[in-house]
Amino acid sequence: MRDQSILRIVAKLLIPYILLFALYVQFHGDYGPGGGFQAGVIFAAGVILYGLIFGLNAARGVAPPLLMETLAALGVLIYAGTGVAAMLNGGTFLDYNALGGHGEHHSESADHGGEHQEHPLPKEEVGDQHHGILPRGQHLGILVVELGVGLTVAAVMITIFFAFAGRERVQ
Amino acid sequence: MTAVAVTHLIVILLLILLLGTAITIVRMRDLWAAAMLTGIYSFLGASWMLLLDAPDVAFTEAAVGAGIATFLMLGTLALTSRTAKPPSGRSLVPLVVVIVTGAVLIYGTFDMPYYGDPEAPVHQRLAPEFLADTVPHVDGSKSKVDVPNIITAVLASYRGYDTLGETVVIFTAGIGVLLLMRRRRDRDEEDDA
């Protein structure tokens, strides 16, 4: 498709907005429709369109296969890691209330756990104690796990694209 | 005409188009055109879901059904043949199975509550709780989860285990495709050697 100048120019115009829209769907999923899965698929569709128009090697340059495989695993790790972080903060697995809005500090589990035991508040009120700019526990947890979903979905879809597009025709 | 009547008209038109596309796909021998038509089918389906106030599902249908799935079908076609083999004889059994299954499914819908029925079981329990937890309160106080898109809140928080499982399934599928395709490539290289 190297000579299809209309396709190339239209794709060049569209791809940035497809990728931007994917990011919007990803990080606005808590307010508008969409979320990690949809965002990941839209992002992957942008990269696949790039690959279809400009060739597989160009797409491999933009999204190196090894990086995609790593990101696919990283997404699952982020999701499960959020659950473990909640456990370290004294909650149950994937109980985002335990993250309490102290997003950057939830690895300081020792001090935190003690604090929660001294003030046996109902779990949903723990988040209300926080007045910073970071989102509260539930909101933060949802944003982080959606990011994990988005990474995994986008990376897996791109990986499958490479796997299919890289095959030779069976004789 | 009222807005509701217009919406009904659009829905009926969409469903007729869906039916027409489906019948065309079944009757078609050119697989390349059939793959493109499945993409159109997905877009029509996505439009219909949007009218049913399900933009999240419509997004997924448009991106996965029309985008990725169509590409995967075309990618597969590039590796095999572009035309379907003519059917070997007409067999009545599949037709009967399809008609009976369809009839049973339609019979099953008779017991379902009507679309948007406020008395439906789904609106009696859980849904009010989800709404109270996610949508901003009228008095300005913060709700429990504070994520206005209920679907995101339900998927990522209330059903966090489910979604973790789904993410792992997608990851596993990717690993599976990778392993299958890679093994074949290595074997080809051995054959060449």
Image (spheres, grey):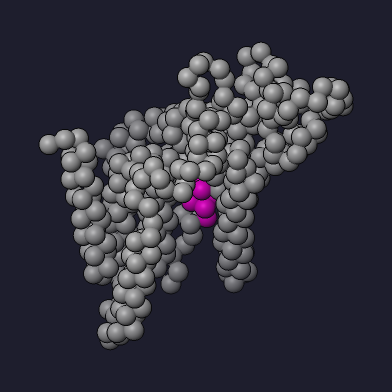
Residue A164: x %, y % from top left? 48, 57
Residue positioned 73% across, 28% down in the render: A122
Using the image as rendered, state which of residue B159 and residue B83 is in the foreground.
B159
Q: Picture coordinates of residue B121 (x, y %)?
A: 46, 49
Q: Image point 26% across, 37% down: which residue? A: A6
- Give the quadrant of residue B184: bottom right
Q: Which residue does the image show at 12% across and 36% down from the upper left?
A: B1
Relative to B70, A109 lies left or right: right
Residue found 23% across the figure and 69% down from its top: B27
The region drawn magenta spans A157-163
Task: Name the side, left or right, on which A56 lies relative to B88.
Answer: right
Q: Is residue B31 left or right of residue A17?
A: left
The answer to whether residue B7 is above or below residue A168 is above
Taking depth in this image into account, of A142 and A54 the one nearest to the observer is A142
Examine the rendered structure and indicate whether residue B73 appears above or below residue A135.
below
Horizontal side of residue A100 vs A11, given as left or right: right
Q: Is B117 drawn above or below residue A122 in the view shown? A: below
User: The C terminus of chain A is located in which quarter?
Assistant: bottom left
Magenta stretch encompasses residue B55: no
